[in-house]
Amino acid sequence: NIETGNADYFQLNPCNLESVLEATTALPIAYKSTPCFSGGCYTDGGVADSIPVKEAYRRGARDITVVLSQPLSYQMRPARAPWLMKRLLARYPGIAESMLVRADNYNQSLAFIHNPPNDATIRVIAPPDEFAVKRLTMNLTLLEQGYQMGIDAGYHHVVRYNGIRHLGG
């Protein structure tokens, strides 16, 4: 939520699907006007809750699968220039504050994944440590390899935990 800087969570339905999907891709600074719906305006939810595993648990989920875009060993570093973040996001101080604590929140979510409560099972799909795709990778071959790795990891996860022997059309 661009006013509060907090994550808002939505139940998807046919009426809000397009708006919610647009909001999840609305990166701060890069997006000219943030998507507005359900009484608020929103930017990428990863700003306030990059890995919403604790929220899933809080809402009652006890068998949780987390899909990461970084290796499980990755630790996010704090913002290097907090003053610049505050200046670039001066119109949205709540978002600026969320960006400044994002690394702490991300790393706390990883700690929760590594040490879940006794009544929870958390499974993780994550790229390997040597994953070559980074945030600004533009090499098409590397992107296609990363895409295929994701498909393969998802397939193996479904087969392993759901007992499905064959997927495909």
Image (spheres, grey):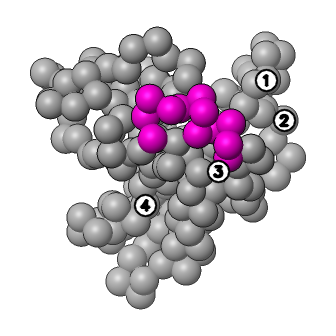
Disc 1 marks a residue whose amino acid type is: Thr
The residue to which callout 4 is attached is 53
Is residue 78 visible to the viewer in this orientation of the structure? yes
Q: Could you say which quadrant of the image residue 155 lies in?
A: top right
Q: Please rate how many residues cluster around mark 1, counting C-alpha atoms within 10 Å: few if below 14, some from 14 to 19, many from 20.
A: few
Which secondary structure, mark 2? Answer: loop
Is residue 153 visible to the viewer in this orientation of the structure? no
Q: Marks 1 and 3: in contact by CB < 8 Å? A: no
Left or right position of 162 against 111: left
Tell me the tag on residue 132.
Answer: 2
Q: CA distance from mark 1 to mark 4?
A: 27 Å
Among the two numbered marks 2 and 4 on one chain, the one whose residue lies closer to the N terminus: 4
Q: Marks 1 and 2: in contact by CB < 8 Å? A: yes
Which secondary structure, mark 1? Answer: loop
User: In which quadrant of the rendered image does the C terminus lie?
Assistant: top left
Q: Please rate how many residues cluster around mark 4, counting C-alpha atoms within 10 Å: few if below 14, some from 14 to 19, many from 20.
A: many
Mainly helix, strand or loop, the magenta region? helix
The residue range painted magenta reads 82-93
Q: Could you say which quadrant of the image residue 105 lies in?
A: bottom right
The residue to which callout 3 is attached is 126
Q: Position of residue 162 (x, y in %)?
A: 41, 55
